[in-house]
Image (spheres, grey):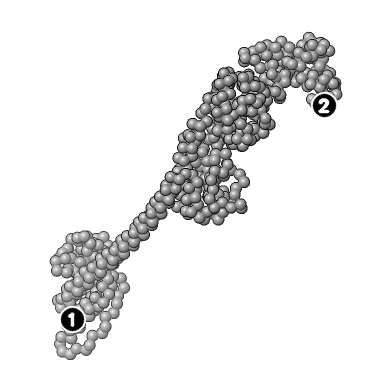
């Protein structure tokens, strides 16, 4: 610890000059200790005062802490620490070394021990000097007590400031929470009040809350309601839900969209046009809350629609099983459906569940309505069935359904044209067309029974066993050779027959040389033991190759 100089005393006269100088040092040191009452400053002043009033120096300073003395300054000396601890609380010499004088001077404030000074000198100080040293102990203890009190007050002040700041932060957070809850309650009250007037009112309320264009689409992307929508903001396609887009890409989206679901089924989508990405968190919550209210409204309307569609569904089921024609016509008339014109049956099957969670019968009904095609729609396990008037082109139906359900993994079978009383036959033909398509190399798409040609007689109710026997009878040796030798004799024969027996056309279609083709045809004659020049043989082989292609991965 450094030292500090005390001011020079005024000159004294008489024999008590040394005594007066010592008293002056004690008084000045005591006064200075209270100018800046810190522990370090107090020990610095008393160390200087000890040297002023005596030939001693302060070897170590100790500070009392919870009933124990802890070294505050001075060179580390565990032995001395033990000696001081053993001498507590009586002032007096402690064992030194080399004959030097060591003394422990305990600093007390009343009965409270505040610290200790270990004094060192070559020789023992005089009794007057020791009196001055003891006199220094009292103001030093008081200064240490004052420093501790000030330090304690500062700690309390800092803790009070910390608590005040924490309380202020808590109050601000609480105020923000109250504001947020009030805002959410206002949003919910506004939307809940609008819900009583239906989906259009909910959309209008959401528009007023967000001050942005709002659009409600059904599950197929068709507009149901809108508010604030302008030509430049009208989307040209189905909205995309936010949760189906990567978070990094959402920042560039113009529409904030929430899906409307009920029991896992997509009922529609509600979107808010936000080109600048400025919607607040509360406004996004309002979109989600509006979607929940709309799910209730749309499901209610869906149930009403199902009740209204029930008679049409029942009539379709009866027509497909051969209902009484007269009664069926009367029921159809009440549903504004004309059974007097030619009819067809459509059977639709799709891999479920679809990515858009859309019911297949709902998708079929929607697309038929889009085509302005009158229909009676019913549902079967894993498929949907429609009785339709035969006055439309059905070639685009598969593509429209693929877009509606969000998957191309489906098949459409179209039955033959018929009168109302023959709808069971058209239904069987539609199922046969669908089955033939599913079992082909290209299982997804549309197959019309009218266009099947030869394949119309190749589908049998025995699961195709008779056809398999027929194919084996005419192509058995060739099929076995192909399996064993990985050759293409059956395929070569099929192309040759399709080409009308023309060598050049066959070789070109197979991209082989004419000599290779001659070798293969000779091998075919040898294995099949058939005369390819016989018209009946050629016909049966042609039918067999077509049947094999249809049932084992060939094109339709």
Q: Is residue 219 left or right of residue 45?
A: right
Classed neighbour count for the residue bearing mark 2: other residues with Cα under 10 Å, few (<14), some (14–19), many (≥20): few
Kindly give the residue lying farthest to the top in the view shown.
Answer: 529
Q: Residue at x 55, y 23 (%)?
A: 317
Residue 333 location in percent, x, y? 57, 27
Q: Is residue 505 in sight in this rendering?
A: yes
Q: Please say if the residues under marks 1 and 2 sit with CB atoms less than 8 Å apart.
A: no
Q: Which residue is mark 1?
A: 23
Q: Is 494 placed above or below 161 here?
A: above
Decide which of tag 1 and tag 2 comes sooner along the chain: 1
Q: Is 7 placed above or below 316 here?
A: below
Tag on residue 508?
2
Foreground disc of the pair 1, 2: 2
- From the image, which quarter does the C terminus lie in? top right
Q: Residue at x 79, y 25 (%)?
A: 510
Q: Is 551 placed above or below 20 here?
A: above
Residue 176 location in percent, x, y? 38, 57
Q: Is residue 140 left or right of residue 310?
A: left
């Amino acid at each position: 610890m450094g030292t500090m100089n005390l001011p020079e005393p005024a000159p004294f006269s008489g024999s008590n000059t040394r005594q007066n100088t010592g008293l002056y040092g004690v008084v000045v040191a005591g006064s200075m200790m209270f100018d800046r009452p810190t522990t370090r400053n107090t020990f610095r002043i008393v160390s200087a005062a000890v040297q002023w009033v005596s030939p001693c120096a302060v070897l170590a300073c100790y500070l009392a802490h919870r009933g124990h003395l802890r070294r505050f300054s001075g060179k580390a000396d565990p032995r001395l620490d033990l000696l001081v601890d053993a001498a507590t609380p009586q002032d007096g010499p402690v064992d030194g070394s080399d004959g030097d004088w060591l003394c422990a001077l305990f600093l007390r404030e009343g009965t409270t021990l505040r610290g200790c000074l270990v004094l060192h000198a070559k020789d023992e100080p005089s009794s007057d000097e020791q009196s001055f040293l003891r006199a220094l102990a009292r103001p030093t203890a008081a200064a240490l007590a004052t420093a501790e009190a000030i330090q304690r007050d500062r700690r309390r002040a800092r803790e009070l400031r910390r608590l005040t700041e924490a309380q202020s932060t808590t109050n601000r957070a609480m105020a923000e929470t109250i504001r947020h809850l009030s805002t959410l309650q206002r949003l919910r009250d506004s939307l809940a009040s609008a819900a009583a007037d239906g989906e259009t009112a909910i959309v209008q309320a959401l528009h007023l809350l967000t001050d942005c264009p709002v659009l409600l689409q059904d599950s197929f992307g068709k507009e149901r309601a809108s508010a604030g929508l302008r030509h430049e903001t009208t989307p040209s396609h189905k909205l995309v839900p936010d949760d189906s887009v990567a978070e990094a890409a959402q920042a560039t989206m113009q529409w904030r969209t929430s899906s409307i679901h009920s029991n896992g089924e997509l009922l529609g989508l509600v979107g808010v046009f936000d080109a600048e990405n400025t919607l607040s968190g509360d406004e996004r919550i309002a979109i989600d809350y509006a979607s929940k209210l709309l799910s209730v409204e749309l499901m209610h309307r869906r149930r009403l629609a199902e009740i209204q569609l029930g008679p049409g569904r029942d009539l379709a089921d009866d027509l497909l099983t051969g209902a009484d024609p007269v009664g069926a016509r009367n029921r159809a008339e009440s549903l504004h459906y004309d059974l007097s014109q030619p009819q067809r049956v459509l059977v639709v099957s799709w891999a479920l569940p679809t990515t858009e969670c859309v019911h297949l019968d709902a998708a079929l009904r929607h697309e038929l309505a889009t085509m302005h095609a009158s229909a009676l729609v019913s549902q079967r396990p894993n498929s949907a069935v429609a009785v339709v008037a035969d006055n439309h082109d059905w070639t685009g139906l598969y593509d429209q359904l693929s877009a509606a359900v969000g998957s191309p993994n489906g098949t459409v079978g179209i039955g033959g044209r018929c009168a109302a009383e023959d709808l069971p036959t058209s239904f069987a033909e539609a199922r046969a067309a669908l089955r033939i398509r599913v079992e082909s190399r290209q299982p997804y798409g549309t197959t019309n029974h009218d266009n099947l040609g030869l394949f119309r007689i190749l589908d049998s109710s025995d699961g195709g066993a008779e056809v398999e026997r027929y194919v084996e009878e005419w192509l058995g040796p060739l099929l076995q050779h192909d399996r064993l030798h990985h050759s293409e004799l059956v395929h070569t024969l099929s192309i040759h027959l399709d080409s009308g027996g023309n060598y050049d056309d066959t070789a070109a279609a197979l991209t082989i040389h004419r000599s290779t083709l001659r070798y293969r045809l000779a091998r075919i004659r040898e294995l099949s033991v058939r005369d390819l020049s016989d018209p009946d043989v050629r016909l049966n082989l042609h039918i067999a190759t077509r049947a094999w292609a249809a049932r084992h991965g060939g094109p339709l």
